[in-house]
Image (tube, grey):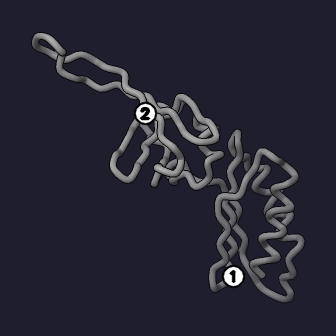
């Protein structure tokens, strides 16, 4: 059943090249969970289209199943490098092997992302602190986890 569902999801996603698969799970009780994202987000209409496409091509007479198609939540970590593009300008929390960064996503390319943040540091001369803008270029292979940092 998994191979058939994967093929159906792939066909449905190919109809809109801005979409991409994040996750596909089939539980032992045949609950099919499909998570898709898009370069510009995913509309409910697209989730419904994918759901109908998969549902109408599976035989409920052979195997009973439930089907859920959704987009990833805001607090979910990124699993595909394409997710960085749609989050340009947003604040991210990024974990590497050695450091944790929180900053605004300035730039995305095929190899790395560029973050910017402000920090208060002691003045080089005299008393007090000064605000300094820092940046970091983080290669994808060094990133262990990244997600949007929500501010309230």
* Residue at 53% across, 47% down: 140
| Residue 27 locus on image (x, y percent) | 63, 80
| Residue 126 locus on image (x, y percent) | 11, 10
Where 68 falls versus 76 (above or below)?
below
Q: CA distance from mark 1 to mark 2?
A: 44 Å
Q: Is residue 49 left or right of residue 74?
A: right
Most foreground residue, 143 or 37: 143
Where 74 falls versus 122 (above or below)?
below
Residue placed under numbered mark 2 in the picture: 136
Badge 2 local density, few (<14 within 10 Å), some, or many (20+)? some
* Residue at 52% across, 54% down: 76
- Picture quarter with the C terminus: top left
Where 116 falls versus 94 (above or below)?
above
Residue placed under numbered mark 1 in the picture: 30
Mark 1 vs 2, N-terminal side: 1
Res 129 quadrant in image: top left
């Amino acid at each position: 059943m998994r191979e058939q569902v994967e093929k159906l999801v792939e066909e449905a996603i190919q109809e809109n090249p801005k979409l991409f698969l994040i996750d596909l799970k089939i539980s032992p009780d045949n609950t099919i969970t499909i998570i898709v994202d898009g370069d510009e987000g995913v509309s409910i209409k697209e989730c419904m289209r994918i759901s109908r496409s998969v549902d109408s091509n599976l035989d409920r007479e052979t195997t009973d199943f439930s089907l859920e198609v959704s987009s990833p939540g805001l607090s979910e970590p990124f699993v595909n490098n394409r997710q960085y593009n749609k989050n340009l300008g947003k604040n991210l929390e990024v974990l590497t092997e050695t450091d944790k960064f929180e900053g605004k996503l300035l730039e995305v390319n095929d190899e790395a992302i560029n973050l910017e943040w402000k920090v208060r540091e002691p003045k080089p001369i005299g008393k007090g602190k000064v605000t300094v803008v820092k940046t970091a270029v983080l290669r994808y292979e060094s990133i262990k986890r990244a997600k949007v940092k929500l501010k309230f």
